[in-house]
Amino acid sequence: MDNTRMLQILEETGALLKGHFLLSSGKHSNRYIQCAKVLRYPWHAEQIIKVLCKKVKNIDINTIIGPAIGGIITSYEMGRQLKIESIFTERVNGKTVLRRDFSITKGSNILISEDVITTGKSTLEVKNLVEEMGAKVLGVACIVDRRPEGINLGLTVYSAIKLKIEIYNEKECALCKQGIKLEKPGSRLISQP
């Protein structure tokens, strides 16, 4: 699947939103990716994740792990296609943890799976957890890599598509100056300065 088709699917399913959005970082953006909108269609999820699976198929992965909620479906679908165990983390009292008797074997090779990477906060929380358990993180696979320039996770990022999306500090936001209504579509609480 090429980038043109990928964008078309994201737009058709309402996963790529255009407008004025408040991000969990507190910054503003002109576009927002809501991958749950595309992942609700299993046939689209299968095709998009197939792009990622091709990129990681030759890596020696023992387990794929995704942070809840966005990484649960991507992790599951990658695991299904690659025939590799898939688990997910959850947030309990603000801390990323494993629950449901999920475990990570010391010395195992782990791939993190996400829907969207922007700042990489969730990815790094999962990475720290995995490394605390004595396993090795081989990289992160995501549907959309929308990291702004200068965001380096110290991991190889495998993405189905890379999108450059405008991000503004609130005081310099061109969309605020135009009076465009601000929306908060995400699930994570807003960071406080």
Image: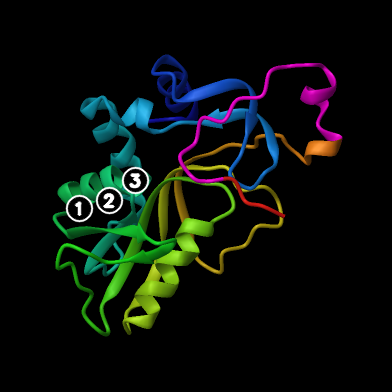
Element under label 1?
A: helix
Numbered tag placed on residue 98 in the rendering: none
Residue designated by label 2: 75
Whether 173 is among the magenta residues is yes
State how far apart marks 2 and 3 are (Cα). Answer: 11 Å
Residue shown at the point (58%, 36%) measured from the top left: 163
Kind of residue sitting beneath label 3: Ile
Instruction: Identify the residue under disc 1.
Output: 79
Which badge, 2 or 3, comes first in the chain's sequence?
3
The answer to whether the residue labelled 2 contacts the one labelled 1, judged by CB atoms less than 8 Å apart, is yes
Q: Disc 2 versus disc 1: distance between alpha carbons?
A: 6 Å
Q: What is the magenta range?
A: 172-189
The percent position of residue 125, horizontal first and vertical second, equals 46, 65
Image x and y of residue 191, in percent:
62, 51
Q: Position of residue 177 (x, y in %)?
A: 85, 22
Instruction: Please name whichever residue, 160 or 85, is drawn nearer the observer in this view of the structure.
Output: 85
Which quadrant of the rendered structure holds the N terminus? Answer: top left
- Residue 173's place in the image compared with 128, above or below, is above
Query: What secondary structure is marked by label 3?
Result: loop
Q: CA distance from mark 3 to mark 1?
A: 16 Å
The amino acid pointed to by label 2 is: Ser
What numbered label is drawn on residue 69?
A: 3
Give the residue at the far front of this rendering.
93
Q: Does residue 192 lie above or below 15 as drawn?
A: below
Residue sitting at x 33%, y 84%: 134
| Residue mark closest to the camera, 3 vs 1 | 3
